[in-house]
Amino acid sequence: MQTKKLEYRIVTDGLEFPEGPIVLADGSVLVVEIKGGRLTRVAPDGTKSVAAELGGGPNGAAIGPDGACYVANNGGFHWLKEDIFETKGYDRPHGRAADYTGGGIQRVDLATGEVTWLYTQCDGKAITGPNDLVFDRNGDLWFTDHGKTYDGVMEQGAVYHAAADGSWIRQAVFPMVTPNGCGLSPDEKTLYVSETETGRLWHWPIAGRGAVEKIAWPSPNGGRMLGQATGYQRFDSMAIEAEGNICVATLVTGGITVFSPEGEKLEYWEGPEPYCTNIAFGGPDMKTAYITVSGRGLLIAVDWPRAGLPLLHQRG
């Protein structure tokens, strides 16, 4: 595996723990601000405007088949200030917020800023900490529920599949240990999910709407482990390259780990701090990677060596 250093330019700063970048056709980038509880539009020149006030802890975002923005809202974290990594006042999420009441999936009308809640439970079971989401070509969304850690308890996480209109939801994978990023292979036959605390990347063949093919124990979740972090690293969100490589945002050391679809660890791109949390592709050739550097509140751009896979809203 090759280790390289990210050569980046700062698109904007001053964000309150940004994640979930979405690259739009006009060159602007939507990000959620987990600590700020909002959805923010970043123009190509770096200026910021509020697209919607979301509350809680907006953790991931994607554009749906109707052009609205869908947000995985984890319900909110407790925040710690750390003078570490040569950064004063470094934001670090921990546990759950004092006013936490639950998590769910929100829909944002980008024209009006109107916010509605689509899902807060599945079959009577609460969705406690949604983290990331991705739309398939049918317009349904896969999303992870990271769970919550509090009072000595670590909740088990899950993966769900749901309709964009709020009419249907099914739990596809359970249990998982802090599932975070999720993505689909270019042919949409494979679901990828990263786990934060284990530093593992899992995959499942998709068997149908709301269903994946599972293998038996000793797999803890019915999936096959595609890859694992090097040493003490934690995994966050992901993006898929056009040829199928999986780019996983990597915490602790801070950067992007690139896996082949066969599980070979191809590259590690070292970033500017431990909280490199999300990556998304855009630009006219899909070779610009936008990465959230959350502790320092940055959105950065990188000239990526390969094209990213267009998401649902980026396809012609």
Image (cartoon, rainbow, N blue to C red):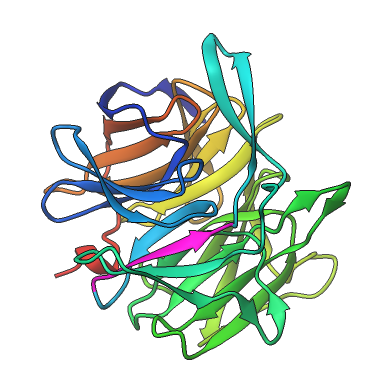
Q: Please say whether residue 262 is one of the residues in the magenta stretch.
A: no
The answer to whether 301 appears left or right of 262 in the picture is left
Residue 26: where, in percent of width, then height?
Answer: 11, 52
Q: Main secondary structure of the magenta part?
A: strand
Residue occupying the far top of the picture: 86
Q: Residue at point 58% right, 33% down? A: 251
Residue 55: where, in percent of width, then height?
Answer: 49, 55
Residue 124 seen in the figure: yes
Q: Please say whether residue 69 is one of the residues in the magenta stretch.
A: yes
Q: Is residue 278 above or below residue 314?
A: above
Q: Nearer the viewer, residue 2 or 42?
A: 42
The answer to whether 299 appears left or right of 238 in the picture is left
Q: Is residue 70 above or below residue 167?
A: above
Q: Residue at point 31% right, 21% down? A: 7
Q: Nearer the viewer, residue 269 or 276?
A: 276
The magenta stretch is 67-74
Q: Residue at point 56% right, 45% down? A: 236
Q: Residue at point 37% right, 24% down? A: 6
Residue 51: where, in percent of width, then height?
Answer: 27, 54
